[in-house]
Image (cartoon, rainbow, N blue to C red):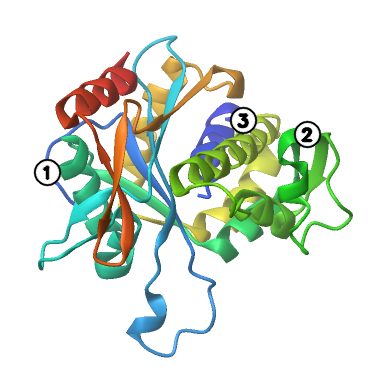
Amino acid sequence: MKRWLSLMLAMALLLPLWAGAQGGPDNQVLLLGTDRLGHRVVNEEDKLSRADAIYIISAPGEGQGLRLLGIERDYLIELPEGGVNKLSTATYFGGPSLALRMVNQLLELELRYYIQIDIPGTVQAVDAMGGVDVMVYEEELAVVNRSPIIVPKARVGLNHFDGKQAQAFMRVRDMALEGVTSNTQRGSRQIRVLSAMMEKVLTLGPRQAARLATQVLPLVQTNMSAYDLLGFLRKALSSDLRADALVYRKSPIGPYLQRRANLHLVVVPEDQAEEIRLVHEFLTH
């Protein structure tokens, strides 16, 4: 019982950060962390947000560990109603279901499921588990400590962050870097927080896990039924759920180009077919 409750929580807590297509693998899930601040909703416009973090988590098979693929938020996409934009805007124009559709189209995948969480949800999830211990590296220390939320200031090595501090750590950006490099560094910080959350969840006893589940599960938006979630967890369990068995890469894996699309600087793989091959290979092996 302890193991299953902990596993369910581990998946629910992945993000900052967790559709409608028929068919497709049940061992892969699209994880979305949006920039919605969670203020009181006055109209439908207030529900709209962009995807700040976009990931695919995959359980490729027995003993192979989990795969976590970060997806560049500045990828060029063509929206269904016409016009081009960044992938991150898909949640603004059509919610998590459109984001799922765009990721499938971009990388020729058949994802069925999404899990989405916003900024307040991430903060509450981290706080519900008593904060997390996260590694901070010397080369990023100055950038991290620019955030007024991280008080006392971070130091090199393990730092204990509450929900607001962890969220600030994941979102802080080095504005001196070009977009993809800056996004990659942010992705590294997001992965460290996710790994810390996963490690902590897997140490919980059954009562602690059940209590945490009641606090965290309402914070996420998903199209997965309990049956779907358990099916994924079975595959994740056989793959190895230890945090140190989590393998991470970011797409574009291969070379990429940057160009202007309207007012946006967007990213396009240099060889789209090769990028698709690399992504599929990573997620399934």
Please give the name of the residue rendered at 86% of the width and 40% of the height, measured from the top-left corner.
Answer: 155
Residue 137 visible in the snapshot: no
The residues bearing labels 1 and 3 have C-alpha atoms spaced at a distance of 33 Å
Q: Secondary structure at mark 1?
A: loop
Which residue is most to the top?
63
Residue 67 higher or lower than 117, as above or below: above
The amino acid type, in three-letter code, at marker 2 is Glu
The residue labelled by disc 3 is 2
- Observer-side mark, 1 or 2, equals 2
Residue 178 falls left or right of residue 279: right
The amino acid type, in three-letter code, at marker 3 is Lys
Res. 138 mark: 2
Compare marks 1 and 3 and give the one earlier in the sequence: 3
Q: Quadrant of residue 127?
A: bottom right
Expressed as whole percent of the image width and height from the top left, the position of residue 38 reads: 53, 74
Please give the name of the residue rendered at 35% of the width and 33% of the height, measured from the top-left corner.
Answer: 251
- 213 vs 169, nearest the viewer: 169
The residues bearing labels 3 and 2 have C-alpha atoms spaced at a distance of 37 Å
Compare marks 3 and 2 and give the one earlier in the sequence: 3
- Observer-side mark, 3 or 2, equals 2
Q: Callout 1 environment at 10 Å: few (<14), some (14 to 19), or many (20+)?
A: few
- 59 vs 278, nearest the viewer: 278
- Observer-side mark, 1 or 3, equals 1
The residue labelled by disc 1 is 22
Residue 28 higher or lower than 65, as above or below: below
Expressed as whole percent of the image width and height from the top left, the position of residue 71 reads: 37, 40
Quadrant where the image shows the C terminus = top left
Q: Quadrant of residue 45?
A: bottom left
Expressed as whole percent of the image width and height from the top left, the position of residue 284 reads: 29, 18
Q: Callout 2 environment at 10 Å: few (<14), some (14 to 19), or many (20+)?
A: few
Q: Secondary structure at mark 2?
A: helix
The residues bearing labels 1 and 2 have C-alpha atoms spaced at a distance of 46 Å
